[in-house]
């Protein structure tokens, strides 16, 4: 029974015949003569399992189009069995222990192939034998056409990725793949041009792999940006392009007219047609007629310009009326990325378009959220959708291997919509994609990624982590951080899929660094010696800084804003836990910890130029937009408590780069993150804004217009302190002197070519009683003097000989004098009491 629960997709009808199992060490094959493709797959599978194929095998595997033997068995058992419901893809599978036999029957070779996929999942390995339960399965799909559309933006799949995906589709009983990468220039911008010979060779290989695996290869083309619907030459050009692909064995084609202007753009078209729908219907009807004249077996469908929504529009009504009924029309659901697709919504659009729908399902696609992986199952698709749906295609992620997890759950849904259960589908999908040993670890990773951008979930691990931090539960904290380390280590060692390992590595690396930092912070929290605690705190933040230099996100809950096409974290619980631990380690010793959290709704950035780089206090690092600036793009500081803000620093622009700053922006503050008070509008690339009587927790800089530039923010700082006057005779290599008094133990100033006798001079304009100095554990001054200005002269009051130093110093003015030549000295903070 357990083996049956693991089958994906879940079969329609399963009859458990008893407790007996068929077990065999050798097998005899009886495969119908013209089922050569299935025979090859069977032989490969049996040999892979180490079971000999012999004439006198312990068991027999029969595969044919003949149902008579299975019918006789059903009659003897008084079972109802009607093969007529199977259609061209359904099959019947019978496994018996006595006589030891397995039989697959289907009306087509593809149907028999699907029966084989179920049998492969039923069988378990026993050394060099196979075992399967006695069972009768009658199975067929809900939705006839099920597959993947490679239709995302940015980095397309490699040719090897495509082969791997097509083979995987066959394994989970999907039967179609659409080639439509937006960033293939010959698919979209250069659609009129022929594909180079190297492309054609790759296409030919891909078509062959598709045929071998009973997957329909569908070639799509997107001419909508420049096509003239009234132009006969454009029509003939498109036909030639399609014929070029048909010559290598392709019979299914699609014309995508999505993501283009929703109006006629050419004067000739405006003169001939009243509407865009009329023009598109005319052009596609002509195309369909000419293609059918060439080959009646050719199939054609299209993606319209208006491809989402639940209400009939004039465009959709006219397209439905005028487009040939044999041309399929795609629809993404109520939204571009639809959280739900109901029978009611599908029925309304199906009625409008006067045909069953071809659904373009934008999950698990992440081209709008390139720093997240969607590893959770498909949800929100209503049972019985097949009443109005002919086909459903998943638009996957740029990460091909990681996409397989969600694709398998979509295969589960589309095959059997009535019995689809996301939890069961996800469990079985993970077993298929990564195997049962790695499945729990990928599941944990997925939950730490928020599961998906469409259906985000707050991870139980992170919830427990935050609770343990607040309750000072050291035992639980250690267990949780160690479990995160184990996830990263186990997958690195045991995940056999090297391509998937490469795709998840930025996330597991970041998780490993976070977890190691957490364990070090726990040591700092319980450490009694302040100098050791400072070294531990510094080590932990070195790891956190390393993690923050990576653009990928983990331990954050994604928030997808459909109307803007933006995804950003609603909360950052894992980072918040590390901040809370850092704060506890500091405040318990009288140290400050004023490190802000940083949020942004900017769609994408790259490694080493992340939002965190805007708050590191360094002018030689920064946060760089990956795409052009959009109106309402923002970067926001969360000071983590309400503070009086004295000054805001906002420095933009990279050296030797022009137009890389936000030209017009608004600065606002808030106490709760919901109600914002506008401070003003600014256009300066370097802003030092002094404030009075401003208390806030949040500070936001927001762009007020679109602009063709990729901004670079070097410094974003909300100063909740009044720094003393400070100067130095040494040269500054990195950072600034203000970093020494900002209450943030992670920012610093780095001095270069320091000579004996150089100094830092501090004028606090008040009596200083004591001072604490935090230096780098390697780039330290080695030996220094604390001098106080007393009776109009500088008097040495103490020596500095360690990275962490604290002592008394009674004066308004103090000097830190370097006594040894040093190439570099890095100081993080100076506390004045």
Image (cartoon, grey):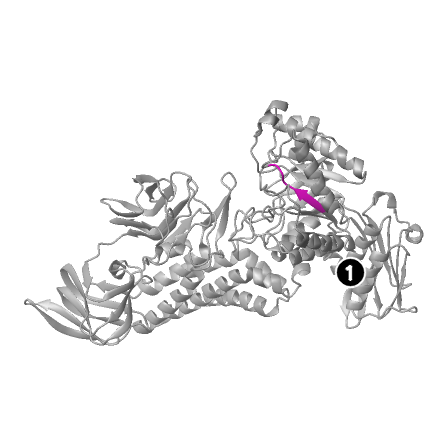
Work out whether residue 568 can be spotted. Answer: yes
- Residue shown at 37%/62% (left/top)? 582
- Residue shown at 53%/51% (left/top)? 457
Work out whether residue 324 or residue 357 is closer to the camera in this orientation and state it.
Answer: 324
Image coords of residue 564 (percent x, y) = 49, 40
- Residue shown at 62%/37% (left/top)? 257
Question: Which picture quadrant has residue 298?
Answer: top right
In the shown orientation, is residue 165 left or right of residue 77? left
Image coords of residue 678 (percent x, y) = 32, 39
Instruction: Say which element carries label 1.
Output: helix
- Residue shown at 55%/65% (left/top)? 487
Which image quarter is the N terminus in? bottom right
Work out whether residue 615 or residue 268 is closer to the camera in this orientation and state it.
Answer: 268
Image coords of residue 500 (percent x, y) = 61, 61
Work out whether residue 314 or residue 211 is closer to the camera in this orientation and state it.
Answer: 211
Q: Which residue is mark 1?
A: 120
In this rendering, the answer to whether 377 lies above or below 747 is above
Image coords of residue 376 (percent x, y) = 60, 52
How packed mark 1 is, by other alpha carbons closer than 10 Å (few <14, some 14-19, many 20 or more), is some
- Magenta segment range? 218-224
**Residue positioned most to the left:** 791
Q: Is residue 38 magenta?
A: no
In this rendering, the answer to whether 617 lies above or below 355 is below
């Amino acid at each position: 029974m357990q083996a049956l629960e693991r089958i994906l997709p879940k079969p329609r009808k399963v009859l458990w015949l008893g407790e007996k199992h068929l077990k065999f060490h050798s097998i005899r094959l009886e495969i119908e003569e013209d089922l050569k493709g299935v025979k090859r797959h069977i032989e490969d599978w049996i040999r892979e399992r180490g079971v000999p194929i012999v004439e006198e095998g312990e068991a027999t595997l029969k595969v044919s189009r003949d149902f008579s033997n299975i019918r006789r068995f059903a009659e003897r058992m008084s079972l109802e069995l009607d093969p007529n419901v199977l259609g061209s893809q359904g099959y019947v599978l019978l496994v018996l222990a006595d006589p030891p036999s397995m039989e697959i029957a289907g009306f087509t070779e593809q149907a028999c192939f699907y029966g084989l996929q179920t049998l492969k999942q039923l069988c378990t390995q026993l050394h060099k034998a196979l075992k399967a339960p006695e069972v009768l399965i009658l199975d067929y799909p809900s939705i006839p056409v099920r597959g993947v559309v490679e239709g995302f933006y940015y980095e397309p799949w490699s040719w090897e990725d495509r082969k791997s995906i097509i083979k995987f589709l066959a394994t989970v009983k999907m039967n179609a793949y659409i080639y439509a990468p937006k960033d293939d220039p010959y698919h979209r911008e250069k659609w009129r041009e022929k594909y180079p010979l190297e492309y054609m060779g790759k296409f030919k290989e891909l078509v062959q792999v598709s045929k071998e695996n009973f997957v329909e290869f569908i070639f799509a083309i997107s001419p909508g940006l420049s096509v003239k619907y009234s132009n006969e030459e454009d029509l003939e050009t498109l036909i030639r392009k399609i014929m070029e692909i048909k010559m290598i064995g392709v019979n299914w084609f699609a014309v995508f007219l999505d993501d283009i202007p929703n109006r006629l753009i050419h004067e000739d078209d405006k003169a001939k047609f009243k509407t865009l729908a009329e023009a598109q219907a005319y052009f596609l009807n002509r195309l369909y007629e000419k293609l059918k004249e060439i080959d009646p077996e050719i199939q054609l469908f299209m993606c319209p310009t208006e491809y989402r929504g639940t209400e009939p529009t004039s465009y959709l009504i006219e397209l439905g009326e005028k487009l040939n009924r044999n041309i399929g029309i795609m629809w993404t659901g109520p939204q571009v990325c639809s959280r739900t697709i109901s029978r009611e919504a599908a029925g309304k659009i199906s009625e409008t378009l006067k045909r069953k729908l071809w659904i373009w399902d934008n999950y698990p696609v992440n081209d709008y959220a390139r720093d997240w992986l969607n590893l959770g199952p498909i949800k929100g698709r209503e049972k019985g959708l097949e009443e109005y749906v002919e086909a459903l295609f998943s638009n996957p992620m740029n990460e091909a291997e990681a996409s397989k997890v969600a694709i398998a759950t979509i295969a589960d849904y589309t095959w059997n919509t009535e019995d689809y259960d996301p939890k069961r589908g996800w469990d079985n999908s993970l077993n298929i994609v990564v195997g049962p040993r790695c499945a729990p670890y990928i599941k944990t990773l997925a939950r730490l990624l928020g599961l998906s951008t469409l259906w985000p979930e707050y991870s139980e691990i992170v919830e427990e982590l935050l609770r343990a931090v607040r309750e000072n539960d050291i035992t639980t904290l250690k267990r949780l951080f160690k479990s995160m380390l184990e996830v990263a280590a186990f997958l690195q060692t045991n995940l056999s899929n090297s391509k998937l390992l490469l795709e998840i590595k930025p996330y597991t690396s970041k998780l490993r660094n976070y977890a190691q930092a957490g364990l070090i912070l726990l040591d700092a929290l319980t450490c009694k010696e302040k100098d050791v605690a400072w070294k531990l705190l510094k080590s932990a933040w070195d790891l956190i800084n390393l993690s923050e230099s990576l653009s990928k996100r983990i331990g954050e809950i994604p928030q997808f804003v459909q109307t803007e096409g933006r995804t950003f974290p609603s909360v950052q619980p894992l980072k918040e836990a590390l901040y809370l631990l850092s704060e506890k380690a500091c405040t318990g010793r009288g140290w400050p910890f004023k490190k802000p959290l940083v949020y942004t709704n900017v769609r994408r950035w790259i490694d080493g130029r992340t939002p965190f780089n805007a708050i590191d206090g360094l002018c030689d690092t920064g946060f760089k937009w990956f795409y052009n600036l959009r109106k309402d793009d923002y970067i926001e500081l969360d000071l983590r408590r309400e503070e009086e803000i004295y000054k805001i620093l906002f420095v933009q622009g990279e050296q030797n780069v022009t137009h890389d700053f936000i030209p017009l922006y608004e600065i606002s503050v808030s106490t709760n993150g919901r109600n914002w008070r506008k401070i003003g509008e600014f256009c300066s690339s370097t802003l030092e804004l002094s404030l009075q009587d401003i208390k806030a927790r949040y500070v936001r800089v927001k762009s007020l217009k679109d602009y063709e530039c990729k901004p670079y923010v070097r410094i974003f700082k909300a100063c909740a302190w009044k720094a003393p006057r400070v100067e130095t005779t040494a040269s500054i290599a990195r950072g600034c002197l203000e970093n020494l008094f900002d209450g943030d133990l992670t920012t610093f100033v780095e001095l270069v070519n320091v000579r004996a006798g150089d100094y830092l001079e501090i004028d606090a304009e008040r009596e200083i009683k004591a001072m604490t100095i935090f230096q780098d554990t390697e780039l330290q001054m080695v030996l220094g003097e604390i001098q106080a200005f007393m009776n109009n002269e500088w008097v040495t009051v103490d020596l500095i000989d360690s990275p962490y130093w604290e002592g008394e110093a009674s004066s308004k003015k103090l000097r830190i004098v370097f006594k040894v030549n040093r190439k570099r000295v890095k100081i993080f903070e100076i506390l004045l009491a």
